[in-house]
Amino acid sequence: MIAPLRLGVNIDHVATIRNARGGDHPDPVRAAQIVASVGGDGITAHLREDRRHIRDEDLARIQSATDLPLNLEMAATPEMLEIALRHKPHAACIVPEKREERTTEGGLDAAGLHNSLVPIVEQLREADIRVSLFIEATERQLDAALRLGAPVVEFHTGEYAHAFLDGDSKKVASEMKRISDMAALAAKNGIEPHAGHGLTFENVQPIAAIPQIAELNIGHYLIGEAVFIGLEGAIGRMRDLMDAAR
Ligand code: PXP
């Protein structure tokens, strides 16, 4: 029996739908309450520089709506650092951010950005915020996370998800090996590995079966599936698939 796997639900796209009409419905706070009521383990939200989904005022509302830990995804900028220090989420996941991208395409170059990340990671740690780095599963990036003293890394599963969608079984196998090897190496070095991006009912189980991975953060697919089977149903089915894979 391996340790249970936590599910963090990324509620950004509830806010995307809300913002499409400029009003206050659907409210991501209500989504956070549903996540809590169906046994989700955490809320993940990405405050982007352009505020295209979650907005500043959502953060405090989400934090006071449930007792679930908030994992704030943030770019490594002075503005986001100040916001994180003010809100003190349970965790801050540092992600790369490009204004023109549709979603977070690729991991953070923790190795190349080492010097600029040092003060950000330090200040978050001093504020007792659990720092996570959203990186590609490579030895170079993992080594950088280790040097930065990050207690958590989240492996970007986008390449795996794309290969799965393309039916490219060779690439799926090589991505799986890369992620599972790096998860083992992370755990061996005292870093807690998480994973996320592009995970669905179809592709979640091989990732969920990697024993060292402690948490998955899943957003777009769950919110999309909620249109058809409700948010409770979507989270419940994902939870069942994850548990069955352990
Ligand atoms: N984890 C991180 C760090 C992310 O930035 C995102 C969103 O890109 C996710 C997980 C969730 O990805 P998805 O919405 O594809 O499930």
Image: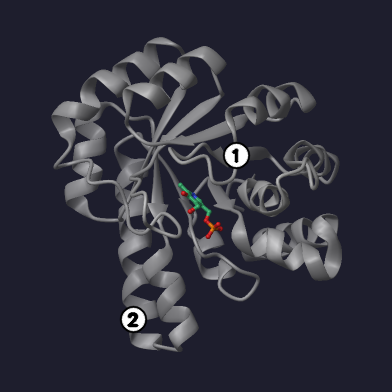
Look at the numbered disc 1 and give the secondary structure of its residue: loop
* Residue under the point 30% across and 17% down: 122
Query: In the image, is 32 to the left or to the right of 116?
Result: right
Judged by depth in the image, the label closer to the viewer, 1 or 2, is: 1
Mark 2: C-beta under 8 Å from nearest atom of ligand 1? no
**Whether residue 66 is situated above or below residue 169 in the rendered picture:** above
User: Pointer 2: what residue?
Assistant: 171
Query: In the image, is 220 to the left or to the right of 212?
Result: right
Determine if residue 5 is in view: no
User: Pointer 1: what residue?
Assistant: 54
Residue 101 on image: x %, y %:
38, 58
Question: How are the residues colored?
Answer: one colour
Q: Give the number of marks.
A: 2
* Residue under the point 40% across and 79% down: 163
Q: Which mark is residue 129?
A: none
Q: CA distance from mark 1 to mark 2?
A: 34 Å
Amino acid at the residue labelled 1: Ile
Q: Which quadrant of the structure image shows residue 118?
A: top left
* Residue under the point 48% across and 21% down: 84
**Whether residue 98 is situated above or below residue 102 in the rendered picture:** above
Query: In the image, is 163 to the left or to the right of 9?
Result: left
Q: Nearer the viewer, residue 183 or 112?
A: 112
Q: Residues within 10 Å of mark 2 (few under 14, many from 20)?
A: some
Quadrant position of the C terminus in the picture: bottom right
Q: Nearer the viewer, residue 21 or 26?
A: 21
Query: In the image, is 167 to the left or to the right of 203?
Result: left
Amino acid at the residue labelled 2: Lys
Residue 180 on image: x %, y %:
38, 60
